[in-house]
Image (cartoon, helix red, strand yellow):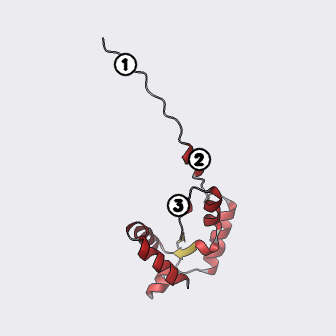
Amino acid sequence: MPYLEKPKKFKKVKSLAKHINYYNCAAWTKLRLSYIVEFPLCQLCLYKGRTSPVEQVHHILPIHGSEDLLEQRNRAYDPENLLSVCSECHVELHNLLVLDPMIYRNLIKFMKN
């Protein structure tokens, strides 16, 4: 005789707790605003010879690229790990990071020097 199995309960994944949202806090808001004041134009557009206002602040080393919470916090709030970018360049940077990490690293290294 067929019977219905009781649905299995899924355990909450503990690793998700490690992905803290560093953006919804006063520290990020203050750092982002001060960075935009210091660099009001897209740094990648300037590198390309164009001028565009900043729309977003990009983390060079992704915050959640590390499992270490202290390292994540350092990456999130380190001004040396930031670039002011327009939306178009922000998408380009993320695509480049995924498609060709070596070119991404070389571009960032060249821009920061």
Q: Residue at x 47, y 71 (%)?
A: 90
Label 1 – label 3 distance at C-alpha: 42 Å
Specify the quadrant that holds the C terminus. bottom right
Kindly indicate the quadrant of the structure image that contains residue 101.
bottom left
Q: Disc 2 designates what residue? A: 17
Q: Mark 3 Cα within 10 Å, few/some/many (few <14, many 20+)?
A: few
Q: Position of residue 98 (x, y in %)?
A: 41, 66
**Which residue, given by chain and number where applicable, does mark 1 sit on?**
4
Q: Secondary structure at mark 2?
A: helix
- Tell which circle, 2 or 3, labels the residue nearer the N-terminal end: 2
SS assignment at label 3: helix
Is residue 11 found left or right of 37 in the rendered image? Answer: left
Quadrant of res 70: bottom right
Residue that protrudes farthest toward the left in the picture: 1
Q: CA distance from mark 2 to mark 3?
A: 15 Å
Q: Is 103 on the left or on the right of 113, as rendered?
A: left
Which callout, 2 or 1, points at the residue further toward the start of the chain? 1
Q: Nearer the viewer, residue 77 or 68?
A: 68
Asked if one can make out residue 17 in the rendered structure from this viewpoint, the answer is yes
Residue at 52% x, 72% y is 55
At which x and y percent is residue 9? 48, 30
Kind of element beneath mark 1: loop
82 over 48 or under it: above or below = above
Give amino acid for label 1.
Answer: Leu
Q: Earlier in the sequence, mark 1 or mark 3?
A: 1
Residue count near mark 1 (Cα–Cα under 10 Å), binned few <14, some 14–19, many ≥20: few
Amino acid residing under circle 2: Ala
**Image quadrant occupied by the N terminus:** top left
For image coordinates 61% across by 64% down, the residue present is 76
Q: Quadrant of residue 81?
A: bottom right
